[in-house]
Structure formats: C-alpha cells, structure tokens
Image: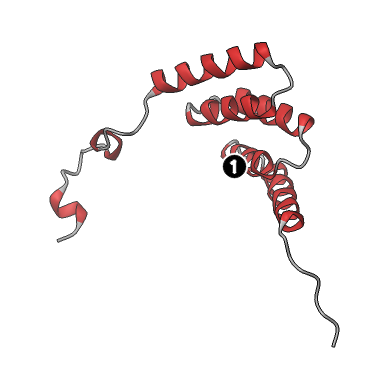
Amino acid sequence: MSASETTPADANPADSNPARPDDQDFDKAIAEFSKAIELKPYAADAFYGRALAYQCKRAFPEAIADYDRVIALDPGHADAHFKRSIVHRQLGAFEKATADFDRAVQLLWRQQVVPPAKEP
C-alpha cells in the first residue's frame, strides 16, 4: 500500500510531523543567536546558527547577510559556502550558487586528511 493510498490527498505533510519546528521556534532561535552576537560580535558560529534559522524561515536576504558574515570571519567555513549556495539557488542566482558550491567542495577537499601517496 502506497503513502498516497493511506494519506488524504489534501493533507499537508508538515502537519503530520509534530517534531517539525514552526516559525515561532525559528524566531526564538534568531533572538537567541542575536543575543549571542551582541555579546560576541566575532562569533562565526552564532552568525551561522542565525543564518540557518533565517534560511528555514525563508528570510533569504537575512540568511545571505549572515552567511556573508560567517565567511568574512572564517573564510574556510565550507558549510556556510554550501548553505549560501542553496539560498542563492532558491533565489535564482545560479552563478553565485555554483561559485559557492564549488568553493565549498574545494574547502572540503582540502580539509580531508589524506595521507600522501607512497612512491613505488
């Protein structure tokens, strides 16, 4: 039996998941991260957390601004490049999305701990 046979066609999948956060949860997270940023304005992790909350709320300009700040504070933050690429894609800025995605891949590749190849 498929899911469509057991779920009404007009049911919203988000309504069936009680663990899914709502906008109030994201608003609370944004407020908490904003407080942390006031205390430590150079805390890249606080900007990253707030950017994620903005992204989940679909507040894309705010998310991009916070991802920009994360990258300014920590240029090697691959996750910020990757997440910003997703936001750019959602906004239709495909060249920016591709550039951010490529940068994230480069950073992740460099961060890999790969032993040097042994010469024969």
Q: Measured from the top left, where is residue 95 in percent x and y?
A: 72, 45
Figure quadrant of the N terminus? bottom left
Say left or right for 118 vs 100: right
Q: Report the residue that reaches farthest toward the bottom.
A: 120
Name the foreground residue: 43 vs 101.
Answer: 43
**Picture residue at 61% right of the left edge, 16% below the top:** 36
Indicate the secondary structure of the residue bearing disc 1: helix
Name the foreground residue: 16 vs 50.
Answer: 50
Say left or right for 50 vs 42: left
Q: Measured from the top left, where is residue 117 in percent x and y?
A: 80, 76
- 112 shown above or below 37: below
**Picture residue at 14% right of the left edge, 54% below the top:** 5
Name the foreground residue: 16 vs 113.
Answer: 113
Say left or right for 43 vs 57: right
**Picture residue at 73% right of the left edge, 26% below the top:** 69
- 92 shown above or below 57: below
* Residue 68 quadrant: top right
- 45 shown above or below 40: below
Q: Amino acid at mark 1?
A: Ile
Name the foreground residue: 76 vs 67.
Answer: 76
Q: Which residue is mark 1?
A: 86
**Picture residue at 81% right of the left edge, 71% below the top:** 116
Figure quadrant of the C terminus? bottom right
Q: Measured from the top left, where is residue 60 in percent x and y?
A: 58, 28
